Image (cartoon, rainbow, N blue to C red):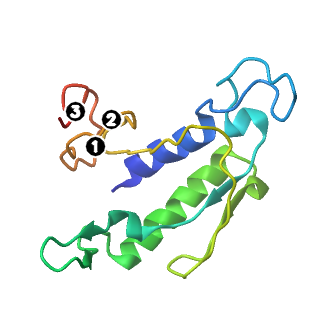
Amino acid sequence: DSDLYARWCATRIAKTALWPERIGSDDEGKAWCQSVASAKLDVLCVSQFTLCASLKKKKGGVSFHRAMNPDAARGLYDHLLSLLRSDLPDSAVRDGVFGARMAVGLVNDGPVTLTLDSRTGNSLAPVRPAPQQDDALPTDTSRDVVP
């Protein structure tokens, strides 16, 4: 994880067109044409190091060895928030308490769930992890789809 990946994620969160032309209307118009920024929506960022958990084979336990060091992760998370606030109005970006146990409720709107993976630049298919590079994101991972 690096500054470049944080910038990629902030841009994708703010500018990917995921909402219809007329949000909340009976006639929503054209689908997939508004972004958080263009529709003036809000963003709730919640840090989740548990996304890096893996199951242990033998005892059924959970391992977090792939998770980033908490101090470094806090810095990267704060940096992501500052990048989002530079792309969106400051009041449009909310966050939880880093490292705290939180109960977050939400309503999913639609049949689509996207996972942003800055290592691949593509969230459409599982891919092999890209080598860690601080200077550039991988450009073509289309042939790296895991069977």
In this view, the mark in front (3 or 1):
3
Residue found at the far top of this picture: 30
- The reply to whether discs 3 and 2 touch (Cβ–Cβ < 8 Å) is yes
Looking at the rendering, which quadrant does residue 82 occupy?
bottom right
Q: Earlier in the sequence, mark 1 or mark 2?
A: 2
> What is the spatial separation of the Cα atoms under label 3 and label 2, in whole angstroms?
6 Å
Residue under numbered circle 2: 125
In the image, taking residue 61 as reference, residue 23 lies left or right, namely: right
Label 3 close to label 1 by CB (< 8 Å): no
Q: Say what amino acid the circle numbered 3 marks.
A: Val
Q: Nearer the viewer, residue 49 or 38?
A: 49
Residue 124 picture quarter: top left
- Crowd band around label 2 with a 10 angstrom C-alpha radius: few (<14), some (14–19), many (20+): few
First along the sequence among labels 3 and 1? 1
Instruction: For mark 1, give the secondary structure.
Output: loop
Three-letter amino acid code at the position of disc 2: Ala
Residue at position x 68%, y 59% in the image: 106
